[in-house]
Image (cartoon, helix red, strand yellow):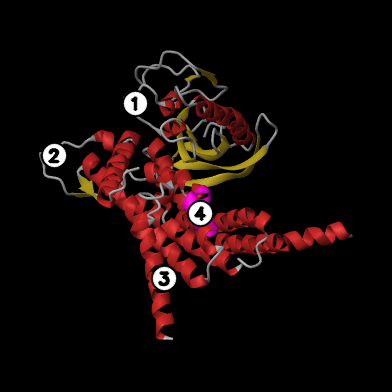
Amino acid sequence: MDKVKYFFQQSWLLIVASFFFGLLIAVANAAWQDNILQNEENKFNDLVREMIPDANASEIVLEDVEVESRKGKKKLTSVRKVVSAEGRRIGWAFMCEGSGFADKIRLVIAADSEFEKFFGFKVLSSYETPGFGSKIAEDDPESNEDLVDEFKDAPVGEFVLVKTGRRREDESQPNDGLIIAISGATVSSDAVVKIFNAYADEVKDKLREKGHIGNGE
Amino acid sequence: MANKGERAASVYKDTLLAGLWRENPVFRLLLGMCPTLAVTAAVKPALTMGCCVIFVLVCSNIVVSLMRNLLRPHLRILMFTLTISTFVTIADLFLKAFQPEMSAALGPYVPLIIVNCIIICRAEACASKNGLAVSVIDAVGMGLGFTITLCALAGVRELLSTGKLFEAQVMPGWFVPWAAMSMPVGAFVTLGLMLGLVNTITGKKD
């Protein structure tokens, strides 16, 4: 009993402050959550437009698709149908996330209308080391270290990360599914590959299961 | 009575000016070097970072000052960290909600304010030993000193690396931008030169 009393004598301020500060953060979060989600939605649409230039709008067709990572962690995502100005389905896009070197990496991945090839990916948010891991977000075809380009037109399936190799000289060459890591950012490159491997097949299976692809539409 | 008021005003003035020059966190105390080097490639992110630091400094100094008599010595650092991280989270949420581009540009450096030495230093050295007024003035002085320094550094780097300030062309047409100034090397060189200049002005020898 004395020990419990001593514990509370010593730490009551910490306990009270924790509750108070937690409440403060919860209030701020509740007040600004709508704006934050709207900003993310806008950013998502902008990134999709960068990957699929003909994209005009997107709508959620599958909600709460459960994806299991290799470590057994379950994550949820929503899959969106991307349509052109004429209303034709031109692709699919979804948000996904995985553990990077510093923190979570969140990506937007886009695939073609039959979910057979990827348009590529864009980084929604990442706290990877500036100058090293942050290079995963750089999309510069002229650069020798363009991870984004490695996924362009790549067939949907399992990707393998390699440390060295010969990059495609232009986009007309077929993509073999081998992803060459960015030097100095192997962990971040590996994280991106793992995200693709965790989500791609799962999302494709769900789309097929619900009749959104493979139905001759 | 008048003497007491004058003395208080003098203390407030000294406290405010200390952060701006005599105890400037960057130039004199060499604290907060991580954001000083990392977010000063342009003035806008530097200014945003400075404003976030002012907000966190003022709020954490207020809270620490108010609870200074209740703090247990062995739990004080824990309490400081808890307080600081709360206000940093609020600042981070605010940026994400109302300045999404700046939030993305600053990346991890806003959450990293939690471990910014300036804030924990002021909580320990000033707010935990002084009343509310002195603590707030100290926070404003230190925050302004930090922000002005960051903006000065960023101004030089942005001007030399792009020829622009706040995206407006400043340098004449014949000016060739120094790309290196936007890179880490530019941050180190500019900071070194500015520190040298400040030491020359103040006559500091060692």
SS of the residue at dot 4?
helix
Front label number (2 vs 4): 4
Residue at 34% x, 19% y: name it: A170
In this figure, which residue is indicated by the disc labeled 1?
Answer: A141
Does residue B169 lie above or below B142 as drawn? above
Outermost right residue: A1
Query: Gap in Å between the C-alphas at discs 2 and 4?
Result: 42 Å
In the rendered structure, which amino acid carries the disc numbered 2? Phe
In the rendered structure, which amino acid carries the disc numbered 4? Cys
* Chain of the residue that carries numbered disc 1 in the rendered image: A
In the rendered structure, which amino acid carries the disc numbered 3? Val
Residue at 50% x, 27% y: name it: A189
In this figure, which residue is indicated by the disc labeled 3?
Answer: B11
* Chain of the residue that carries numbered disc 2 in the rendered image: B
Front label number (1 vs 4): 4
The reply to whether discs 3 and 4 touch (Cβ–Cβ < 8 Å) is: no
Which range is magenta?
A: B114-124
